[in-house]
Image (cartoon, coloured by chain):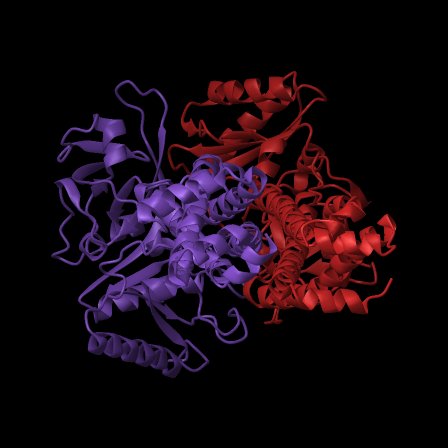
Chain colours: A purple, B red
Amino acid sequence: MFTYYLQLGLRSLRRNPALTALMVMAIGFGVAASMITYSVFRAVSGNPIPGKSAQLYTPQIDNWGPQQNVKGEPPDALDYVDAMALMRAHEAKRQTLLYMVQMSVMPGGERDLPLAANGYAVYSDFFPMFDVSFQYGGSWSGQDGQERSNEVVISDQLNQKLFGGVDSVGRTVNFNGHDYRVVGVTRHWDPKPRFFDLFSTSGFEDASDFYMPFNRAMDLQMRSGGRNSCRGTINYTTWEGYLQSNCVWITPWVELDTAADVAHYRHFLESYAADQQRAGRFVWAPNVRLRDVVQWLDFQHVVPPESRISLLLALGFFVICLINTIGLLLAKFLRRAGEIGVRRALGASRREIYAQYLIEAATVGLAGGVLGLLLTTVGVSGVSVLFPPEIAKLAQLDFKLVGLTLLVAIVATVLAAFYPAWRAARVQPAWQLKSN
Amino acid sequence: MQIKPILVALRRHKAGTVLIALQIALTLAIVCNALFIIHERLANLSEQSGVDEGNALVVTNHWAVEKPTQQVDAQIRADMAALRQLSSVRDAAPATGYPLQGGGWDNFITLTPEQVKPTTDSAVYVSDDHLLDTLGVRLVAGRNFRPDEILVMGTQEVVIPPVVIVSKALADRLFPDGSALGKSIYAMGPTPSTIIGIVDVLHRQGTSQWNKAYAGQSLIWPARPADSRGVFYIVRAKPGQRAAAMREVPKALFAQSRMRMLDPKDGILDYAQVRQRAYDSDRGMVILMGLICVVLLAITAAGIVGLSSFWVGQRRKQIGVRRALGATRADILSYFLTENFLIGLGGVVVGAVLAIGINLWMVTQFEMARLSLAYVAAGVVALLLLGQGAVLAPALRASHVSPVEATRSV
């Protein structure tokens, strides 16, 4: 019976071509608008490290005080003094500090021009904490706690550019005129959004090229290649003065496995800030935060407002298309009241009429879904017109999106058909037969 | 026209009536908000930069090797001499940033050194005496820097020059009585800078929401930015020679030194590209909202046509009876138009409330401005007209129903 109804449904699509076309278009446009904006939203709002997002925390300490901080929140990064204090205390299982550095790879081989490279100064815990896996080699040693060797971990892309992708462990790279020994090559690793550095990036920049030991960068007095934010009067004149200033530029991360560990670390932060208050460095009560990855992404508003607004508007648009479809289905079904009357008189039950018209609606939904899929394909490839390039390129049409498009179209249309089909099933056979 | 019989008749088509009214209500709510977003974003897109955008271009120059400040400064001076000599170039200046860059250096401003809460915030451009001519910004009071006032600012060094040029927006914010020229301000430094010049419009680097509160507030400090990491070169081509300058500038720079990096993708941008990058998401929103509005109105209109046609089809007999009893074609036409108007009226009342509700919610979520009631009013009129337009064809068809229909098959 299902296939028979399906055939009836398909045949009836051709009966009122204008009405059918209108419904198919409404559903097609509605579902396509929703799916295109959803493909972008999905890309920017995803959890970049699903397995560990609840174990990774970024501590914040208010070193600016209530008069200079933003809306009572501690700054989004740490100054050098607080960052080093956290490292020395070592109250977490794993911990790292990081900041963005920009360097150049000196010419060599066939390259006659220097090559720009962006990376991070980090501690060796960075790699296991963030699940960075290695193609060759591994991290530099974190054993002595110094982390100031001339060693570097490079990304697979930089390894491709510099060494043609071969195992380059042990080879030398010259960054900014200093030689570094390659100790590891990462596999492709580019979490989107880049949760670990939302201070200097919007979360969607190109993948980083290298990672170097944090204290090596300190020894070379390497300024941050990212953001730097200060308060009050800036009066430092030397590197040492800069390190002692209230300028924030370092992002800390700690790995805490259990709720007890989190509570313990939070307590540690509170007591650290209280110590600073007692010592007179802070003249305000402790004001600290400890946010995990998801909370941090949320707090930093990583999802661009444009993406949210356009998804909501597209969904609203889809709802209107569905209301439109309800009206049109009602018109389409009730036009055939006579036909329904005959079928009912010949013994069809209400349930059968109901099923027939729901299936007919599903065929409309299917047609709308196919149109929607075509439009979504066009839309996703042209999404760079609507969103900045770094975000647009994240939107992809994959198997899941194709399935979702068809499913949403059919399910939504069938839902929209509940009322019209119910009305059709309630047609009184006697009435219809009488007037014909 | 009697309204009561129409209302009575509508009660027999509750579902259709509610559906059309609901569709009109939601369409109004969404179109009002979408148009308002378009309006806001278009305002962003048309923000003035103060730059001679037709001729200016920006080079992002990263140094390959970290060198002492003196050597960096010498290289910058050599580069400038080379660029200013090019036949296609009118002027050039080294700078720490450029208008519409998308984010950059800004400092809080205070009027006294002890003040803890800042008076306001200003974008900071550090450049030499060529910047004004290179950007093409207009001096409205005071004077430009003299060559002997240009200091040198090393890597993240704190150099507070004793003189400063500010934008008119900043001058007016700090000294609303118009007395800014000659006054001193503190920009997070221990020593003051005296305002020696005021320029007309000079946009900040940033275009984000946060910058809106400080729109147009910027200052220029006289120093060559000899940062060992890199520097921006702003170049103003002679009229009509921008393309030639785009080609010649990188050649001239590499002839000076090859130990620099100009990104092949965005190492050198003309101002059309700078503006496009700065307002990417605004332009995208305008296009998306515009598309949604157009398709939405079309679908709503089509929906009204569809349902009205169905109603006309259903009521052919009644129409025939009315015609036979003496109703004119105009009576039938106006019956359907009035019916649609009444439904539309119900829809827009609900829609107006919804539109304002959605906007109030968006204000809390997305830092948007309040919806102006003019938009709602315009939307109401537009949707009522749309409804009348959509129902016109079915209504005309209804008015052509012959009185003979009344006699058939009853």
Q: Give the x, y percent position of residue A289.
A: 37, 73
Q: Give the x, y percent position of residue A372.
A: 46, 41
Instruction: Kindly identify the residue that appears in the image at 34 percent across and 20 percent down.
Output: A112
Question: In terms of depth relative to the viewer, which is nearer, A123 or B198?
Answer: A123
Q: Give the x, y percent position of residue B215.
A: 67, 54
Q: Is residue B239 visible?
A: yes
Q: Give the x, y percent position of residue A318.
A: 52, 53
Question: In terms of depth relative to the viewer, which is nearer, B21 or A42?
Answer: B21
Q: Quadrant of residue B351?
A: bottom right
Horizontal side of residue B42 vs A181, given as left or right: right
Q: Quadrant of residue A240?
A: bottom left
Quadrant of image for the N terminus of chain B: bottom right
Horizontal side of residue A250 vs A254, given as left or right: right
Is the residue A34 above or below the residue A234 in the image? above
Instruction: Kindly identify the residue that appears in the image at 43 percent across and 65 percent down.
Output: A299
Instruction: Kindly identify the residue that appears in the image at 37 percent across and 83 percent down.
Output: A278
Question: In terms of depth relative to the viewer, which is nearer, A412 or B121?
Answer: A412
Quadrant of image for the C terminus of chain B: bottom right
Q: Is residue B97 visible?
A: no
Horizontal side of residue A407 vs B232, given as left or right: left
Is the residue A98 above or below the residue A276 in the image? above
Is the residue B245 above or below the residue B19 in the image? above
Is the residue A389 above or below the residue A257 in the image? above
